[in-house]
Every structure is written in C-alpha cells, then in structure tokens.
Image (cartoon, helix red, strand yellow):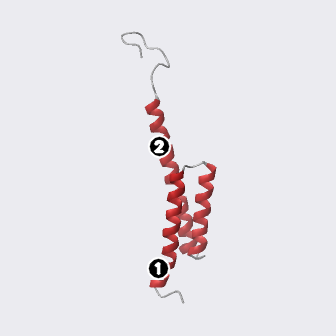
C-alpha cells in the first residue's frame, strides 16, 4: 500500500492469507477423510458385523480414493501407510489376545 497516499485496490500483499486459507482447506480435507474412513471401518467391523478385514479394506479404499481425487502429497500417503500397518497389526493382535484365532 502506498505510504501516506490513497488506497489503491489490489496493492496489498495477500500471500500470508492465501497460505493460511490453503492450510485450513488441507486440514479440513485430512480431518474429513479420517472421519469418513473411521466411520466406515467401525460400521463394517462392529455395527454391521462384517468383520475387521472388510472394514479395513473400505478404510484403505476411501483413503486411496481421496488421495488420488485430491492429489494429496507424500505426507498423506505416509500417514495412510502407517495407519494401514497399525490397524492391520491391531486386527491380528487383538483377536489373538482375546483367544479368537484358532
């Protein structure tokens, strides 16, 4: 903006505002994706009774679909891979501890 002069439309640097809004949109997308994935996993595993593995497959399908649709970065894919490993291990360990595998 001009010092001591009249305001001229379009002179303000809005780079910071653009970055904040972009961060908000990305955070909203990540949050929405994880909520949708969790709801599908828990619905299939417990509410419908289809089991953990079909729920985990739906979890992965939603994650991959959102990742491809919105061209998510490598951090998103790393988080999805870690979640897949942790949930897969949980699907093996918890039933084993409960004596259900056999």
Q: Nearer the viewer, residue 93 or 40?
A: 93
Which image quarter holds the N terminus?
top left
Q: Where in the figure is residue 28, as x and y percent of width and height?
A: 49, 48
Q: Nearer the viewer, residue 32 or 79?
A: 79
Q: Which residue occupies the extreme bottom position in the image?
A: 102
Q: Nearer the viewer, residue 73 or 65?
A: 73
**Compared with residue 90, is residue 7 higher up or lower down, i.e. above or below?**
above
**Compared with residue 7, is residue 98 higher up or lower down, i.e. above or below?**
below
**Which residue is rendered at x = 59% and y = 53% of the image?**
67
Which mark is first along the chain, 1 or 2?
2
Give the label on residue 24, or none.
Answer: 2
Q: Secondary structure at mark 2?
A: helix
**Tally of numbered discs:** 2
Give the Cα distance between marks 2 and 1.
Answer: 36 Å
Residue carrying label 1: 94
For the residues carrying marks 2 and 1, which lies nearer the camera in this image?
1
**Which residue is rendered at x = 61% and y = 68% of the image?**
57
Q: Is residue 60 left or right of residue 79?
A: right
Give the label on residue 53, or none.
Answer: none
Q: Where in the figure is residue 89, as x and y percent of width and height?
A: 49, 74
């Amino acid at each position: 903006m001009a010092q001591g002069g009249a305001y001229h439309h379009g002179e303000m640097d809005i780079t910071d505002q653009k970055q904040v809004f972009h961060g908000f949109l990305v955070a909203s997308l990540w949050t929405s994706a994880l909520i949708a994935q969790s709801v599908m996993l828990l619905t299939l595993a417990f509410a419908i009774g289809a089991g953990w593995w079909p729920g985990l497959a739906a979890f992965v399908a939603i994650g991959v679909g959102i990742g491809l649709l919105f061209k998510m970065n490598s951090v998103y894919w790393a988080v999805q891979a870690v979640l897949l490993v942790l949930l897969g291990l949980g699907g093996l360990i918890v039933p084993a501890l409960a004596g259900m595998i056999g």
